[in-house]
Amino acid sequence: MTTATQKHIGRNISRIREIKGMKQITLAELLGVSQQQVSIIENSESVEDSKLESIAKILEVPVEAIKEYSDDKVMNVINSTITDSPINLNNNFCTFNPLDKLIEAHEENKKLYERLLEAEKEKVAYLEKLLSSE
């Protein structure tokens, strides 16, 4: 029997905040809450949608990026961009924000989904037109 693992939204918020180089107190001030409340949020498995939207806006990431964040995804992005060129042999550090790459991939997937959805709507409209003409 396979069980789905619950994403720990608070931990994801914490990791993204750290990647962005933001302190808890800064997030707290921008949210209009205390640092202790941010700590409680980051230790919570789930966060209410309105609070999550506010946090996502402050962190400048989509809500989905917080919900779907994983360290493995970030490491895969980093590892797939490091080459073995002579220039990089002594400088194997990330020159970009891996979270930005994940967001770009999410946005591309979203655009693809929207195009596929539009194509399906066009098919349905065409079929309805065919049925109504009979």
Image (tube, rainbow, N blue to C red):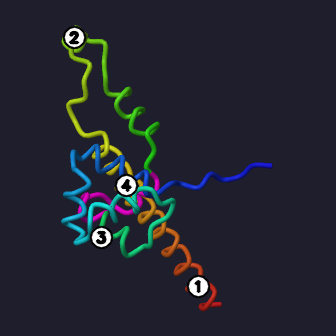
- Mark 4 → mark 2, Cα distance in angstroms: 32 Å
Classify residue 54 by image quadrant: bottom left
Q: CA distance from mark 4 to mark 1?
A: 46 Å
Which residue corresponds to mark 3? 54
As displayed, is residue 31 above or below residue 12?
Answer: below
Q: Quadrant of residue 62?
A: bottom left
Label number found at residue 128: 1
Give 74 or 50, whichever is nearer the viewer: 50
> Which disc, if any, is residue 13?
4
C-alpha distance separating marks 3 and 2? 40 Å
Q: Earlier in the sequence, mark 2 or mark 1?
A: 2
Q: Which mark is residue 105?
A: none
Q: Amino acid at mark 1?
A: Glu
Q: Relative to the observer, which residue lies in front, 36 or 128?
A: 36
Closest to the camera, between mark 1 and mark 3, is 3
Q: Magenta stretch containing residue 66, yes or no?
A: yes
Foreground label between 4 and 1? 4
Relative image position of residue 92 (x, y in whole percent): 26, 19
- Could you tell me the amino acid type at mark 3? Ser
Which residue position holds label 2? 90
Q: Tell me which label, 4 or 2, sits earlier in the chain.
A: 4
Q: Position of residue 41 (x, y in %)?
A: 40, 62
Check contact, mark 2 vs mark 1: CB within 8 A: no
Instruction: Give SS at disc 3.
Output: helix
